[in-house]
Amino acid sequence: MARDQQVIHFRCAQPPTANPDKYMDELLDAYLFVEDADALYAEYGAQGVEFTRGLGNMPWHRREFVVKDCDGRLLAFGANL
């Protein structure tokens, strides 16, 4: 998968074991650094992406949000403040 000259390589693996606390504990499957979290958040919102945490500034100097993908994985996207 690629976007804006960034490439992510995935591997084929067995499905993860179910974790009923995954969403409550926000156990992320991936964290992706982006240039403009606001623009990406707006783009994903317009496409109906399911957010599990809205856009906001974090104490660790990132502006980020979390989505749930079509397989139920939690993906965080963050930009430097």
Image (cartoon, rainbow, N blue to C red):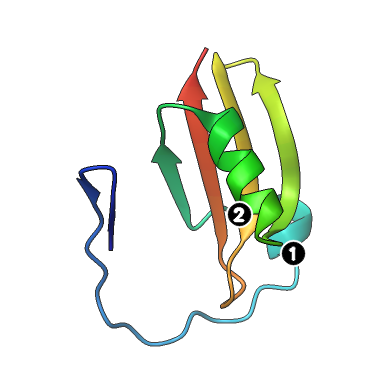
28, 39: nearer the viewer:
39
State which quadrant residue 49 falls in.
Answer: bottom right
Disc 2/disc 1 C-alpha distance (Å) = 8 Å
- The answer to whether residue 28 is left or right of residue 24 is left
Residue at the extreme bottom: 14
Q: Is disc 1 placed on a helix, strand or loop?
A: loop
Name the amino acid, label 1.
Answer: Asp
Q: Residue at x 66, y 73 (%)?
A: 19
Please report the residue visible at 62 percent of the width from the left and 41 percent of the height from the top: 41
80 over 34 or under it: above or below: above
* Pick the front one: 26 or 9: 9
Residue 40: image location, x then y, percent:
54, 40
Relative to 57, residue 64 above or below: below
Q: Which residue is mark 1?
A: 21
Disc 2 residue type?
Leu
Instruction: Identify residue for label 2.
Output: 27
Residue 17 image point, x, y percent = 55, 81
Residue density around tag 2, few if under 14, some if 14–19, many if 20 or more, within 10 Å: few
Circle 1: is it few (<14), some (14-19), or many (20+) Cα within 10 Å?
A: few
> Residues at badges 2 and 1 in contact (C-beta under 8 Å)?
yes
Q: Residue furthest right?
A: 24
Q: Position of residue 10 (x, y in %)?
A: 27, 69
**Earlier-in-chain disc, 2 versus 1:** 1
Q: Is residue 36 above or below residue 81?
A: below
